[in-house]
Amino acid sequence: MMDHSGFHCFFQSEEPLWVGRGPAQSSCLVGPRDGAFRSDYSANKMILNNITQVTSATNAALKAGLVGAELDAEIRKRTIHGVDLSISLEPLPDPKNRVTLSTTRRDPHGIACPDVYYDVGDYVRKGYEASVAQLKQIAGLFNATELNITTALNANNHIMGGTIMGADPKTSVVDGNCRAHDHANLWIPGGGAMPSASVVNSTLTMAALGIKAADDISRALRA
């Protein structure tokens, strides 16, 4: 199983940026998505969020004890200078990260419960450290103040793997058309069939796998 572990970076820029007036994400830094470094640590994707800063700016101003005109001025300043980045990290296809059927737990219907094993791994952890160094450089270009880089990795719920595709039933769950090796009338399309991942979102790949499975189902119905 795989997911894009992520974290966030916030700071106040020297120049006003006026974020929050367009799409939720304005652009993405794609340079760190690939390179020789990937033999040592994960790639990253840095998204420039364009969501309004009003809530976080208001909370910070209230926490500072400001009221009246000073409160309004501080909210305005923080709103137009605030920067918010979301960073995603590339996962490895580690066979230890998996879903199995429990041998000790069952649901009320007597069906075995799932046991989930997942660890982001040192590859991703080292990628986090490299990303932090890059973010500090970026913040320096903005002459940033109040730099805050979160330390806990969060899930992005881009669930990939778990029912991976392959030619060998001993090492995979479905074939290249997302059809189960063990059940001829079962297809499991979507991200679960992905045997590996990159640092970018998996939505289009999931959709493509769904279409591929649909074509195979159509052929099976006509056979």
Image: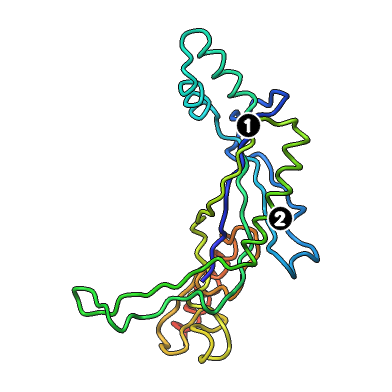
Horizontal and vertical percent for residue 155? 50, 56
Q: Find residue 136 and report its image quarter.
A: top right
Residue at the outermost top position: 69
Horizontal and vertical percent for residue 46? 67, 48
Between 11 and 185, the residue placed more toward the observer is 11
Relative to residue 105, is residue 129 drawn left or right?
right
170 vs 9: above or below = below
Horizontal and vertical percent for residue 27? 68, 42
Which class describes the residues within 10 Å of circle 1: few (<14), some (14-19), or many (20+)?
few
Q: CA distance from mark 2 to mark 1?
A: 20 Å
Relative to residue 204, is residue 109 drawn left or right?
left
Which residue is labeled 2 in the image? Answer: 130
Relative to residue 52, is residue 222 drawn left or right?
left
Horizontal and vertical percent for residue 129? 67, 55
**Dot 2 amino acid type:** Ala
Label 2 or label 1, whichever comes before in sequence order: 2
Q: Find residue 103 and report its image quarter.
A: bottom left
The dot on residue 33 is none
Between 23 and 16, the residue placed more toward the observer is 16
Which class describes the residues within 10 Å of circle 2: few (<14), some (14-19), or many (20+)?
some
216 vs 12: above or below = below
Which residue is labeled 1 in the image? Answer: 146
Q: Residue at x 54, y 88 (%)?
A: 171
**Dot 1 amino acid type:** Glu
Q: Residue at x 69, y 29 (%)?
A: 13
